[in-house]
Image (tube, rainbow, N blue to C red):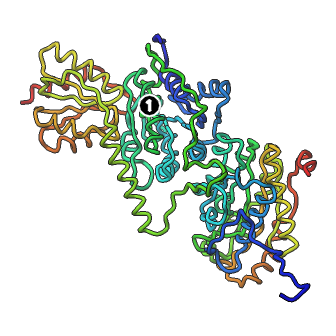
Amino acid sequence: MTKELLKGNEAMAEAAVRAGVEAYFGYPITPQTELLEYMARRLPELNRAFLQAESEVAAINMVYGAACTGKRVMSSSSSPGVSLMMEGLSYIAASEVPCVLVDVMRGGPGLGNIAPSQGDYFQIVKGGGHGDYHPIVLAPATVQEAIDLTYAAFDLAEDYRHLVIVLADGNVGQMMEPAELPPMRPTNGRPRPRWALTGAQGRPKNIISSIYLVPEEEEKFNQKLQDKLALIRQHEVRYHTYELEDAEYVVVAFGTAGRVAQTAVKQARAQGLKVGLFRPISLYPFPEEPLTRLAETARQFLVVEMNAGQMMEDVRLAVNGKAPVKFYGRMGGMVPLPDEVLDEIRRMTADR
Amino acid sequence: MVAGLQEEITFTRPASLAETVTHYCPGCTHGVAHRLVAEVIDELGLADKTIGVAPVGCSVFAYNYFNVDFAEAAHGRAPAMATGIKRASPENIVFTYQGDGDLAAIGMAEIMHVAGRGENITTIFINNAIYGMTGGQMAPTTLAGQKTTSSPCGRDVKTMGMPLRMSEILSGMPGAAYVVRRSLHNVKEINKAKKAIRRAFQVQQAGLGFAMVELLSNCPTNWGLAPQESLAWIEDHMLPFYPIGDYKVLPEVEALK
């Protein structure tokens, strides 16, 4: 395998194809549309299902239906479109059918704009739809990571019978950079799971539903869901660190903000500042425990985000008052520059 | 046993109809509609490849009544969910079972687009002119002047609009192959309804496009009528506004046996 120059949205699409996605349902929305367009060309040539839905509401319910058949299915959208999907996502989480969604975040709230943002953190990481659930949330910072996480998302979804969301931002979706695609996996030969709706042939009927009218039964189901989430928290934490070994100051940032912050940390190191980067890759499960450990030794934390401080709340929970947690953010589709982050780092290290 | 007299069972439960305690109100025609669908599934030999999609409404528990695989959709989204199932798994027979609130109000976009795309699914549409599950509110199909808990003085068409005739509307969609309205208010019409349901599943088997059977149904509880009176109410009040008839039948459907 060799590296190719790939656009983030198309790279995620091809990664999903190679992971064996068998059906895609979506609706055009910038800055995600290239993913849908790529699927529109690619899936029919592989004899797999592609359908442009009449809305994101319909698209996610098509995903829900297709996921009930036990096949690998996905959708992709961007912030306002993902808002429309929240109903379906709650049903999917409650029905325990596996599926993958890519959210290429743009500026908001409202119609906002089509520039890169991380404003969907609350909506995606905290559940978003009604009821107690969290999707598994994976946040890439590079095109290569977007490929790798999308590829892995399908296995994770099936392993846990759960919803996996790749939370990219417009920058990751739109930029081109050299990256390597994974090998093509065959879609045939994968047995349909026992719970899937395939027609009740030689077995009792299968029912996929999220209704439990008796509160005791609904609570029992909720407990089961919580147990599953606990298992996910135990096994699926992912993060990237840079120059943390002797760091007295820790910058915490995810996705594109994490990449910008890494450049700033590198520059700060060149100036002799003892600073390192902690970049969460899994936003749910949030890498709480490693941050709590860092809080034992770090003097201060700086959270950098392309929003008003959404992940910052989780960092503060992990740090739990052991060290000050500062915040630097840009909003509305603005991407912070390394110089701005470096200024914040210098301010933090000067503030003893 | 007396010589010459033999017991013969002439009426049995269809194999596709599950033996379960009904949750429907006394006199409700959902039970009739369920039975007709189950009979058709049996007669066409489709039980082991059928996937049903239940709505939100009184028939939210439809899956308890059928011995076939079933999914429970979000309110109004059964057609989208059925689309996903059918596209991912075209070898299955997929049907939605939806009420008037589900199909004609919150799920209007989804039903219009499955009909527009000619999605190869079958829809059983129960029109009883009211929201049953939530306790008798106005539906898009509530008749002009009809009293409901959310139109207590009767549906005033000036402010609440006229009722929607879904079979007529959907018959105008290019991908609709078979759209008919039948009624469940007497035995003769029930027999006709069954033939239409059978045809609607055959349309899907033949891959001809979207098929829907609208079934005029009752709601004794929320209409405040005895079961017998409610059947007469269908005939007296619903039939004049919702005529029984074939609204779209493609020539290819006519040619089906």
User: Viewer-proximal residue, A130 or B91?
Assistant: B91
Eyeballing the image, is A168 above or below A201? above
Quarter placement of the C terminus of chain A: top left
Residue under the point 88% across and 72% down: B188
Eyeballing the image, is A110 above or below A113? below
State the SS at label 1: helix
Give the x, y percent position of residue B237.
80, 75
Q: Circle 1: is it few (<14), some (14-19), or many (20+) Cα within 10 Å? A: some
Give the x, y percent position of residue A148.
43, 25
User: Viewer-proximal residue, A244 or B231?
Assistant: A244
Q: Residue furthest left?
A: A352
Residue B165, visible in the rendered structure: yes
Eyeballing the image, is A82 above or below B249? above
Residue under the point 72% across and 69% down: B128
Residue A310, visible in the rendered structure: no
Amino acid at the residue labelled 1: Ala
User: Viewer-proximal residue, A62 or A77?
Assistant: A62
Residue under the point 50% across and 22% down: A11
Q: Which residue is mark 1?
A: A152
B124 sits to left or right of B101: right
Give the x, y percent position of residue A129.
45, 50
B109 sits to left or right of B35: left
Q: How many marks?
A: 1
Give the x, y percent position of residue A2.
46, 10
A142 sits to left or right of B217: left
User: Viewer-proximal residue, B16 or A268?
Assistant: B16
Tell me where residue A3 sits by quadrant: top left
Tell me which chain the residue with mark 1 is part of: A
